Image (spheres, rainbow, N blue to C red):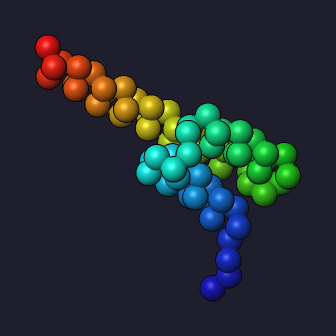
């Protein structure tokens, strides 16, 4: 079994955002830097971007639910 750096970086960015370890905007910057250095592919950058979009939507929904419960 070999180590896949691009997969490691991609999944690391996604899980870091989901776990609140880094801000989504910073993950986007990291993904862009990894792409420029050819450490990940454009497809993987898109995968990170899609995961960030889903994370932000879930956060907005949770925030709205919390606001509705307060009222």
Place of residue 38 in the rendered image (x, y in percent of width and height, measured from the top left): 83, 54
Q: Residue 70's quadrant in the figure?
A: top left
Place of residue 35 in the rendered image (x, y in percent of width and height, measured from the top left): 78, 47
Above or below, 49 against 40 in this view is above
x 65%, y 59%: residue: 9
Q: Which quarter of the rendering shows the C terminus?
A: top left
Seen as rendered, the residue at the extreme top is 71
For residue 26, side relative to residue 71 (left or right): right
x 75%, y 41%: residue: 32
Can residue 31 be seen? yes
Q: Which quarter of the rendering shows the N terminus?
A: bottom right
Seen as rendered, the residue at the extreme right is 37
Above or below, 61 against 33 in this view is above
Which of 24 and 36 lies nearest the eye of the viewer?
24
Place of residue 69 in the rendered image (x, y in percent of width and height, measured from the top left): 14, 22
Q: Residue 25's quadrant in the figure?
A: top right
x 58%, y 58%: residue: 12
Seen as rendered, the residue at the extreme front is 70
Place of residue 39 in the rendered image (x, y in percent of width and height, measured from the top left): 78, 57
x 50%, y 33%: residue: 53
For residue 63, side relative to residue 29 (left or right): left
Above or below, 59 against 42 in this view is above
Looking at the image, how many numbered discs can be counted on the residues? 0
Can residue 42 be seen? no
């Amino acid at each position: 079994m070999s180590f896949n750096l691009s997969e490691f970086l991609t999944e690391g960015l996604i899980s870091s955002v989901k776990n609140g370890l880094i801000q989504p905007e910073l993950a986007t910057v990291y993904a862009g830097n990894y792409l420029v250095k050819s450490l990940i592919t454009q497809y993987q950058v898109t995968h990170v971007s899609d995961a960030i979009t889903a994370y932000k939507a879930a956060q907005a929904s949770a925030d709205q639910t919390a606001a509705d419960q307060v009222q």
